[in-house]
Image: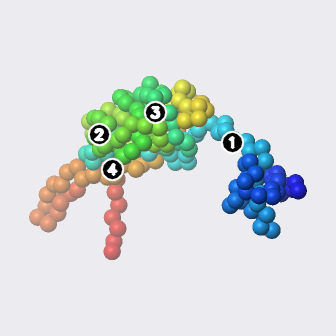
Amino acid sequence: TDTTATGIQVRSVSAPTTAGASANAKNSYGTPVEVADATAVTDKYAPAVTTNGYETLDVDANGQIDHIKVIFTEDMQAGLVSADKFTVAGYTVVDAYAASVGAPTSATARTGATVGDDVNVFVRVTEKTTPDTGATPKVTIAAGMKDVPGNAFAAVADKATVDKAAPVLVTALRTGANAVTLTYSEGVYSVND
């Protein structure tokens, strides 16, 4: 007996030994069923960057941005991720890579990250000479990257970053008999208990 339910064709079979049948697949009446003419699903959707997927990082905690983390909606082909695809306003891009395991722990190398296809792409920039963890530079990404199934990423320009670089204490100066002035890498506010 042939039936159709919610756009899926099923065919009742008399025994699980019939070619293509599965003894574990049964309809609500307990009759074994098989999916007819199964079709493989192919990903044809282009990858994008997630909402708020551009993040500033200060991985060595010295008060200066050293990476931008870009979070894509799909795993990107690691071999197509490169520094020349990224521009970060006000910074010099020196490296870019997809990290399938870990995250960078160095401001000057890929230490801590294993390169491989992944949604997380790290863009290393040259640190400024002054503290800047509160900065939110704009990011531009050129065409030329693809997700693992081969769908091309469309270029984007001037995307805002989210401040994920924590403030760092830069100086602590005694400014009086009972006073100390603390200077951080970005503006901070006090929280009263």
From this viewpoint, is residue 86 visible?
no
Residue marked by disc 2: 111
**Distance between the alpha carbons at the discs numbered 4 and 1:** 48 Å
Going from the N terminus, do you reach mark 2 or mark 4 first?
2
Residue 147 spot, x, y in % from top left: 55, 35
Residue type of the residue flagged with mark 3: Ala
**Distance between the alpha carbons at the discs numbered 2 and 4:** 26 Å
Residue type of the residue flagged with mark 2: Thr
**Foreground: disc 2 or disc 4:** 2
Q: How is the image coloured?
A: rainbow
From this viewpoint, is residue 15 visible?
yes
Residue marked by disc 1: 41
Q: Secondary structure at mark 4?
A: loop
**Foreground: disc 3 or disc 4:** 3
Going from the N terminus, do you reach mark 1 or mark 3 first?
1
Q: Quadrant of the N terminus?
A: bottom right
Vertical arrangement, residue 132 with respect to residue 177, above or below = above
**Foreground: disc 4 or disc 1:** 1
Q: Residue at x 52, y 48 (%)?
A: 52
Q: Quadrant of the C terminus?
A: bottom left
Residue type of the residue flagged with mark 1: Val
Residue 45 spot, x, y in % from top left: 65, 38
Q: Residue at x 44, y 45 (%)?
A: 55
Going from the N terminus, do you reach mark 3 or mark 4 first?
3
Is the residue marked by circle 2 packed among few (<14), some (14-19), or many (20+) residues within 10 Å?
A: few
Q: Nearer the viewer, residue 169 or 98?
A: 98
Residue marked by disc 3: 78
